[in-house]
């Protein structure tokens, strides 16, 4: 579980432990920072008061003030996805996939995406390299000399 000490709000970074106990830093943006600050300043202190027994260092807490577990996190994500009108087939991995796809569609280097996802092998990251039609059209128009000419012109 992510602990409060793993979060660096000033740098918009969080330390996570992945497969094989491998640590990496995950970056997040300003909207996420604002949401985390609201949670830490408003919601989390209320949940801490509900704790029974030894205080937890977990960043995310359940309604009893204990560490939010995987099942609880999944239930919250399912509720949020449903409220947003996302399909029932939505999975947490969908967020990861979207993250990688948006980075690649935005022109991020595959090695950068590999690092951000914490993949050991570049081949694992290449799963995300399917290219959207819109990106293909944009790259084609920008790179191919004939794409910019009107039909029949020389």
Image (cartoon, helix red, strand yellow):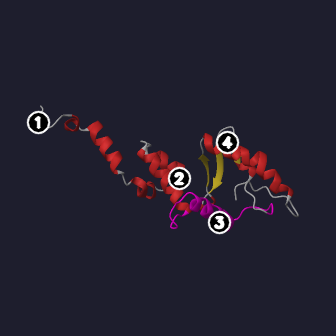
CB contact under 8 Å: marks 2 and 4: no
User: Mark 3 or mark 2: which is in front?
Assistant: 3
Question: Cα distance, mark 2 to mark 1?
Answer: 46 Å
Question: Cα distance, mark 4 to mark 1?
Answer: 54 Å
CB contact under 8 Å: marks 1 and 3: no
Residue bearing the label numbered 2:
117
Which of the two discs, 2 and 1, labels the residue nearer the N terminus? Answer: 2
Q: Is residue 144 magenta?
A: no
Eyeballing the image, is 32 above or below 56?
Answer: above
Residue bearing the label numbered 4:
34
CB contact under 8 Å: marks 3 and 2: no
Which of the two discs, 3 and 2, labels the residue nearer the N terminus? Answer: 3
Question: Cα distance, mark 2 to mark 4?
Answer: 23 Å
Which of the two discs, 4 and 1, labels the residue nearer the N terminus? Answer: 4
Eyeballing the image, is 110 above or below 22?
Answer: above
> Is residue 119 found left or right of 74 in the rendered image?
left
Mark 3 residue crowding within 10 angstroms, few (<14) / some (14–19) / many (20+): few
Residue bearing the label numbered 1:
152
Per the image, label 2 sits on a secondary structure element best described as helix
The quadrant in which the N terminus is found is bottom right
Q: Residue at x 50, y 51 (%)?
A: 99
Question: Cα distance, mark 3 to mark 2?
Answer: 23 Å
Per the image, label 3 sits on a secondary structure element best described as helix
Which of the two discs, 2 and 4, labels the residue nearer the N terminus? Answer: 4
Residue 70 in view: yes
Question: Cα distance, mark 1 to mark 3?
Answer: 58 Å
User: Mark 2 or mark 4: which is in front?
Assistant: 4
Residue bearing the label numbered 3:
75
User: Mark 2 or mark 1: which is in front?
Assistant: 1
Q: Residue at x 46, y 48 (%)?
A: 102
Q: Residues in magenta?
A: 64-91
């Amino acid at each position: 579980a992510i602990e409060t000490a793993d979060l660096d709000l000033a740098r918009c970074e969080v330390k996570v432990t992945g497969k094989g106990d491998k640590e990496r830093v995950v970056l997040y943006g300003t909207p996420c920072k604002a949401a985390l600050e609201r949670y830490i300043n408003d919601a989390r202190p209320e949940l801490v008061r509900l704790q029974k027994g030894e205080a937890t260092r977990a960043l995310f807490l359940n309604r009893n003030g204990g560490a939010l577990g995987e099942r609880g996190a999944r239930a919250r994500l399912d509720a949020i996805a449903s409220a947003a009108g996302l399909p029932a087939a939505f999975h947490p991995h969908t967020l990861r996939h979207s993250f990688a796809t948006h980075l690649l569609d935005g022109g991020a280097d595959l090695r950068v995406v590999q690092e951000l996802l914490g993949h050991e092998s570049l081949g694992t990251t290449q799963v995300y390299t399917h290219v959207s039609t819109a990106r293909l059209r944009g790259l084609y128009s920008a790179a191919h000399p004939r794409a910019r000419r009107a039909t029949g012109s020389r």
